[in-house]
Amino acid sequence: MDLWTGDKVWNCVSAGLALAAFAAFGPASAQTANTHPDFAGRWQRNAMDPELPASGPGPLVNLRRPMDDHTPNGGGDPLPLVGDYNNPILKPAAAAVVKKAGELSLGGRINPDPSNQCAAYEPPYAFTIQLGVQFVWNGDELLMLYPQDDQVRHVRMNATHPRNLIPKPMGDSVAHWEGDTLVIDTVGVKVGPVSMVDRYGTPHSAAMHLVERYHLIDVNDAKAALAFHVRRTGPAGAFPVDPKSGEGLRMTYTVEDPEVFTTPWTANITYLRSLAGWAEQICAENIVEYWPGENIAVPKAGKPEF
């Protein structure tokens, strides 16, 4: 059995949530039509952040690399999140936001974000931090289950966005098949206190438009893509790869937001079929990074509150 290695495992989706979904909607392999590819099973990867596109504008990368030894207490500490604020996709105001977030991280603090604030992992932020996904089909609805913090997306198949769209934390997502490719179109992602498109604090506006395209690829191509990505970003997880699978899953997404970005840009995410179990996970808000010697205790009430 292959073990896709790393230094940390993020294979946590609520067991109760997954079981409830299966009970309500049937097996994950129930596609909307038998002619479509089978995305059944758990898909996983072993490094955060998206992969760069082969060409054209791409996502922000961390200016700090795993081989750098510039973290406050040596290379064993968490790698600071310093987004490339010079990336030409950023308009000046967005670049300033990213630069400020990076300065906080270099100082041993982090920006409030959907993860440390237990908020909805809005797309495409979810793609930069979630290391797994599972598809659960129910005819006209697709549920996408994500491991970290028990996140769920609801996607309407063969539907259109409502005319009077009300923004929501996860946005409004509709999908359709284009041959062997599942295409998900998302608009109406609500702008909130911790809204961002990546781990570097890059903002978005209410005008953001996201398109995801999922298709199966050869398992060896998927492994090569993941290995290349890990060399650039550093590993974030280890999981057992399904040895019977000859397929990987490639997702390419495009972000367009004329209020924040100078141009549309594209990124990739690659997954392998995983045999790892999904465990329950509970989120606890904490915007303090744990540098050695600076751990801050959980707040305690001075007197009973009830």
Image (cartoon, grey):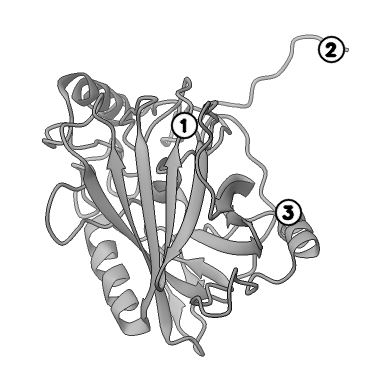
Query: Looking at the rendering, which quadrant does residue 95 occupy?
Result: top left
Whether residue 193 is situated above or below residue 136 in the rendered picture: above
CB atoms of marks 2 and 1 within 8 Å: no
Residue at image mark 3: 17
Whether residue 36 is situated above or below residue 123 in the rendered picture: below
Q: Nearer the viewer, mark 3 or mark 1?
A: 1
User: Which amino acid, mark 2?
Assistant: Pro
Residue 261: where, in percent of width, then height? Answer: 21, 31
Q: Is residue 9 visible?
A: no
Q: Nearer the viewer, mark 2 or mark 3?
A: 3
Q: Which callout, 3 or 1, points at the residue further toward the start of the chain? A: 3
Residue 81: where, in percent of width, then height? Answer: 30, 38
Compare residues 221 and 141 and report the one nearer the observer.
141
User: Which amino acid, mark 1?
Assistant: Gly
Q: Which mark is residue 304?
A: 2
Secondary-structure class at tag 2: loop
Residue 43: where, in percent of width, then height? Answer: 50, 68
Q: Is residue 112 visible?
A: yes
Secondary-structure class at tag 3: helix
Residue at image mark 1: 188
Compare residues 98 and 139 and report the one nearer the observer.
139
- Left or right of 7? Residue 254 is left
Residue that appears at 45% across and 64% down: 177
- Left or right of 112? Residue 29 is right
